[in-house]
Amino acid sequence: MVCASALLLGLVYAAPATAQQTPDDAAAREYFERGRSAFEDADYEGALVYFRHAYRLSQHGELQYNIGVAADRLQREGEALEAFEHYLEESENAAREGEVRERILALRRSIAEQEATARALEEASIRYQTPTPSETHSDRARVPRSAIIGSSALAAVGVAGVAAMSVGLAKDGSCSREVAGRCVTESSATAWTWAYGGIGVAALVGSATWLALSMKRSNEQRKTQLSVSPTGVMVSGTF
């Protein structure tokens, strides 16, 4: 490819001596010469810029070959493919037709493979991506039935205990027996009043803790991680 491109680079502007030269032709030839020099120095980025300027001014279809070769060296396969196709369309009796057609086929295969790989990675990423807020909320709702029943039972015990304590405290100091309009027996809070309250609070805390731990465990079991390595795509996590 190096020898072939060098030969074409030297012949692109081999126009007949009688051809009418215009300012644009002179400027185009100057850009072409700069592009050829840059190409020979392996400055393919600069060569690509100069060749495009030369084509813009001259509209010589042969310059599309130079553009394609420079883009190919930069591994810009899409740009190279487009330039080579324009070369065949715009050049009469294209000198490099056989070579260019082979390169076009190779570029199309390479681009198709890259697009297929990109699609596969995108599908894998969508399948194993981090859950969205709505998905996360849904996952958190998937708490084991046993945890829901157990925490609900504890919560009921807790509410009952706190209610019993509240009743005992409310009666503290009230009259439970009157004689002749005078209170002879006065109610007071007992040790059981505080015991019921302690049991109730502990049960409520236990219910909340049980439910929180069950939700956390459920989320951890659904976490997955997608990573791309030089050898392929790896999915890790707990299922």
Image: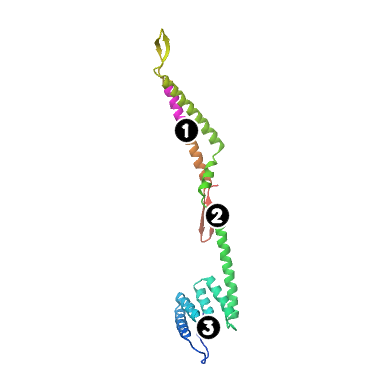
Label the magenta part by its dominant secondary structure.
Answer: helix
Q: How many marks?
A: 3
- Amino acid type, label 2: Ile
Residue visible at 53% across and 78% down in the picture = 64
Residue visible at 53% across and 41% down in the picture = 141
Q: Which residue is mark 1?
A: 206
- Amino acid type, label 1: Gly
Indicate the quadrant containing the N terminus: top left, top right, bottom left or bottom right: bottom right
Image location (x, y in percent) of residue 2: 51, 79
- Amino acid type, label 3: Leu
Q: Which residue is mark 3?
A: 8
**Image quarter of residue 41:** bottom left
Tell me whether the residue at label 3 lies in contact with that at label 2, contact meaning CB atoms closer than 8 angstroms: no
Q: CA distance from mark 1 to mark 2?
A: 38 Å
Is 195 a magenta residue? yes
Residue ranking furthest to the top: 180
Residue 23, relative to residue 167: is it above or below? below
Q: Earlier in the sequence, mark 3 or mark 2?
A: 3
Is 61 a magenta residue? no
Nearest the eye: 171 or 38 = 171
Identify the magenta region: 193-208
Nearest the eye: 30 or 25 = 25
Query: Secondary structure beneath disc 1?
Result: helix
Q: Which residue is mark 2?
A: 126
Q: CA distance from mark 1 to mark 3?
A: 83 Å
Residue ranking furthest to the bottom: 18
Image location (x, y in percent) of residue 88: 59, 79
Tell me whether the residue at label 1 lies in contact with that at label 3, contact meaning CB atoms closer than 8 angstroms: no
Q: CA distance from mark 3 to mark 2?
A: 47 Å
